């Protein structure tokens, strides 16, 4: 078995981003997708703080403390970028003007329900940010996550146990073990690493079916930063 | 008499009283009116309701108002601290000393925008079926369910911008803009903290928020 590491999962998700799309990459792991876009693909990266046209991270000596994305990363702008206020930015999201969002998650249910905003940490306040807006209103919602929790419990479930972010919104899930589509018939495995179907099913909390052309999930070697 | 909204930090918050609802700009590290926040802390009005994206952002000094026990309630989208120890907000919230209303960020900013735009409520698909919208009115339009969200208005907006002129026209630096236009429009008194106030009136092409929304500008 050769499970993907976290950056390899983002690489795999990035391969499905198409030329010309408007894309919002979630805070945390998903923002790394922009490092692995196919070379022929030109996209507009929107960040919900109002940046339309996020460019690469800024070099430390060139960074402007006011030029940041929603995750507080100091960024640059791509040529042709613009910046709008939060109300307009979320009107853009709610109005269906974001083609694809890629989000992290704790759990995804077989009907597409998503739980990614509140892991109920003891002694910590909640944090929702723009997750619900993106999940409910992007034209397509894709998720990146580990297939199971650190304790080995499945994250792909019949029904989410954690508080929901949005209902019936996820279309595709990329994990370290598989690419899984959410369909009207539940989870369908499109790609999986070289393990048995029984083993993948055992790590999944809902019934899996396998696409007739189910492929082997591979990714180029990418070293994970410590 | 020519309009002149220039003020000093010492008089920028004149008229702010106990129980005020206070908007505070800033998101993603940009656009925090930290000098005005410290001036408000020093002035010390009590029982404030803060309307702020994050109660705990590391670059904002919002937490100093909370630590000074001036705050009764926070309406926000993020309330998680960053350090090992619970934040000033979290300790008070867990002890039941401060009320929290958590709102999805797009609904948060749209509720404020609506408040400044004369719209008392609106329907949004965001949050349907989640615990953040429990108890709110649900209405179906077409084939989708929507949640009714009500407008937020307030007494004071503290807005960070880059450049102003004496009319209160504002220019923001990059992502400083975030909640500034919405918050300024929804408050009875809108005070902008800026890097500089231009001697000349700003050119139309540069102005991102008309000065009609701003009551006082302070260069810091």
Image: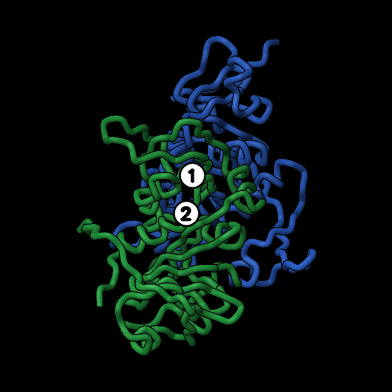
Chain colours: A green, B blue
Query: Residue placed at 70% from the left, 10% from the top?
Result: B1
Marks 1 and 2, the one that precedes in the sequence? 2
Query: Residue placed at 60% from the left, 62% from the top?
Result: A136
Q: For the C terminus of chain B, give its image quadrant.
A: top left
Q: Nearer the viewer, residue B119 or B158?
A: B119
Q: Nearer the viewer, residue B114 or B1?
A: B114
Up/down of B197 relative to B156, above or below = above
Query: Residue placed at 59% from the left, 17% from the top?
Result: B166
Q: Local crowd at mark 1 within 10 Å, few (<14), some, or many (≥20)?
A: some
- Residue A93 placed where, x, y %? 60, 51
- Residue B100 placed where, x, y %? 54, 62
The mark found on residue A8 in the picture is: none
Q: Chain of mark 1?
A: A
Residue that numbered label 2 is attached to: A17
Residue that numbered label 1 is attached to: A43
Tags 1 and 2 in contact by the CB under 8 Å rule?
Answer: yes
Up/down of A215 relative to B115, above or below = below
Inter-mark Cα distance, 1 to 2? 8 Å
Is any atom of residue B165 visible in this view?
yes
- Residue B59 placed where, x, y %? 37, 43
Residue A55 falls in which quadrant of the image? top left
Q: Chain of mark 2?
A: A
Label 2: element kind:
loop
Q: How many marks?
A: 2
């Amino acid at each position: 078995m050769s499970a993907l590491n976290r950056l390899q999962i983002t690489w795999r998700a990035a391969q499905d981003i198409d030329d010309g799309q408007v894309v919002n990459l979630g805070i945390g792991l998903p923002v790394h997708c922009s490092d692995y876009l196919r070379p022929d693909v030109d996209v507009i990266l929107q960040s919900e703080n109002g940046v339309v046209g996020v460019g690469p991270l800024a070099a430390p000596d060139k960074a402007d403390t006011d030029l940041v994305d929603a995750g507080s990363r100091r960024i640059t702008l791509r040529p042709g970028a613009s910046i709008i206020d939060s109300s307009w930015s979320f009107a853009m999201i709610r109005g269906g003007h974001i083609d694809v969002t890629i989000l992290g998650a704790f759990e995804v249910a077989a009907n597409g329900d998503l739980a990614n905003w509140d892991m109920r940490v003891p002694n910590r306040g909640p944090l929702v940010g723009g997750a619900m807006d993106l999940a409910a209103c992007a034209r397509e919602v894709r998720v990146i996550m580990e297939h199971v929790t650190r304790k080995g419990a499945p994250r792909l479930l019949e029904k989410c146990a954690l508080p929901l972010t949005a209902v019936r919104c996820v279309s595709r899930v990329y994990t370290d073990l598989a690419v899984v589509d959410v369909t009207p018939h539940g989870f369908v495995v499109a790609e999986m690493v070289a393990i048995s179907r029984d083993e993948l099913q055992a790590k999944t909390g809902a019934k899996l079916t396998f696409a007739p052309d189910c492929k082997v999930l591979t990714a180029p070697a990418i070293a994970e930063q410590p | 008499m020519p309009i002149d909204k220039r003020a000093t930090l010492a008089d920028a918050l004149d008229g702010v009283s106990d129980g005020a609802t206070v908007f505070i700009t800033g998101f993603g590290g940009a656009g925090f009116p930290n000098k005005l926040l410290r001036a408000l802390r020093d002035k010390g009005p009590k029982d404030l309701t803060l309307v702020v994206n994050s109660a705990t952002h590391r670059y904002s000094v919002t937490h100093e108002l909370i630590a000074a026990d001036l705050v009764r309630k926070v309406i926000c989208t993020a309330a998680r601290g960053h350090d090992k120890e619970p934040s000033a907000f979290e300790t008070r919230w867990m002890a039941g000393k401060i009320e929290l209303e958590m709102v999805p960020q797009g609904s948060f900013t749209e509720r404020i925008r609506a408040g400044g735009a004369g719209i008392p409520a609106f329907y949004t698909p965001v949050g349907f079926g989640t615990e953040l919208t429990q108890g709110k009115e649900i209405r179906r339009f077409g084939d989708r369910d929507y949640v009714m969200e009500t407008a937020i208005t307030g007494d004071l907006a503290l807005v960070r911008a880059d450049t102003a002129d004496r009319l209160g026209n504002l220019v923001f630096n990059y992502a400083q803009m975030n909640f500034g236009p919405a918050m300024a429009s929804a408050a009875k008194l809108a005070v902008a903290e800026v890097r500089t106030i231009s001697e000349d009136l700003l050119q139309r092409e540069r102005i991102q928020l008309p000065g009609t929304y701003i009551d006082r500008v302070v260069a810091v």
